[in-house]
Image (tube, rainbow, N blue to C red):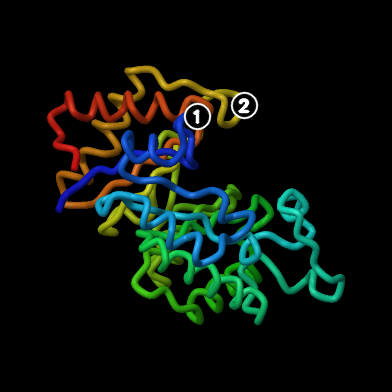
Amino acid sequence: MLSLKVGCCGWAVKGGMEAYFKTFKVIELQSTFYKLPRIETAINWRRKAPDTFEYTLKCWQACTHPATSPTWRKAGIRVPSDKTDKYGLLKPTKENFEAWERTIEVAKALRAVAVIVQLPPAFDSKEANLDNAYRFFKSVKRDDINVVIEFRNRSWTLELVSSLCQRLNLIHAVDPFKEATATKNSPLIYYRLHGLGRRMYVYDYNDEEHIRLYREYVKPYVDRGKDVYVLFNNTNMVEDAKRFMEIAGTENLNLP
């Protein structure tokens, strides 16, 4: 079924999960980046959601961010000093592979559409990182779950990302207002919108921008039979996601 799915990065709707389910049909879980829930908790989240509701989730930071990252401290996780160099940056280590397996088990419990691998700004396109990415993704299981990857270092050119994603069967996550997707031929298009202001995330989209988002970045892919996911990740994410759905409807798109 051709579809556009619109939602937020996190349970942003006032009233909790039940209110969110009544408002949107997809969520990108943010909490999984910091700490993975117990499998029983993930199963419960799946049971609470409508059958047609879709989950995506961020990959646990153990795979992507070094143990020295402030995000580990924010999560309250301490790593023994002899293990700090074993985590993050997609290193093909036993510790990273185990972290991925735990992430996939949670994704399976949620019946998730995709796992979002968000790499730190320090992960540039140097040869060592390319080698890590190839070895890591060639080794891990996916269990038919889409793997979406987001680069946050400018050294990753469109051509380089396209080649990497094609060889490793990855989907490129982008903010379409800021960069083009390198996987436009994938059956799934994944957008994460962070705002257009000077301060990242602090932004309210206007109607002109919503219309542009739909006409330039969504409709062309929906018309080609692709599933397009639009996840707002800005301070006004709830109202922006709702308004975008209204505008998409006005533009004669039948939302599922």
Q: Where's residue 207, x and y in %?
A: 33, 18
Q: Where's residue 134, x and y in %?
A: 52, 75
- Left or right: residue 41 compared with residue 190: right
56 or 133, nearer to the observer: 56
Element under disc 2:
loop
62 or 159, nearer to the observer: 62
Q: Where's residue 114, x and y in %?
A: 39, 59
Residue sitting at 15 percent across and 34 percent down? 253
- Give the residue type at disc 1: Gly
Are the two marked residues, 2 and 1, in contact with CB atoms closer than 8 angstroms? yes
How crowded pointer 1 is (Cα within 10 Å; few <14, some 14-19, many 20+) is rated as many
Image label count: 2
- Which of the numbered marks, if any, corresponds to residue 220? none
Q: Where's residue 3, x and y in %?
A: 20, 46
Element under disc 1:
loop
Read off the residue under disc 1.
195
- Left or right: residue 142 compared with residue 117: left
Quadrant position of the C terminus in the picture: top left
Residue sitting at 42 percent across and 22 percent down? 205
Read off the residue under disc 2.
199
Mark 2–mark 1 distance (CA, rounded to whole Å): 8 Å
How crowded pointer 2 is (Cα within 10 Å; few <14, some 14-19, many 20+) is rated as few
Q: Quadrant of residue 145?
A: bottom left
- Give the residue type at disc 2: Arg
Q: Quadrant of residue 44?
A: bottom left
Residue sitting at 48 percent across and 56 percent down? 116
Residue sitting at 41 percent across and 45 percent down? 27
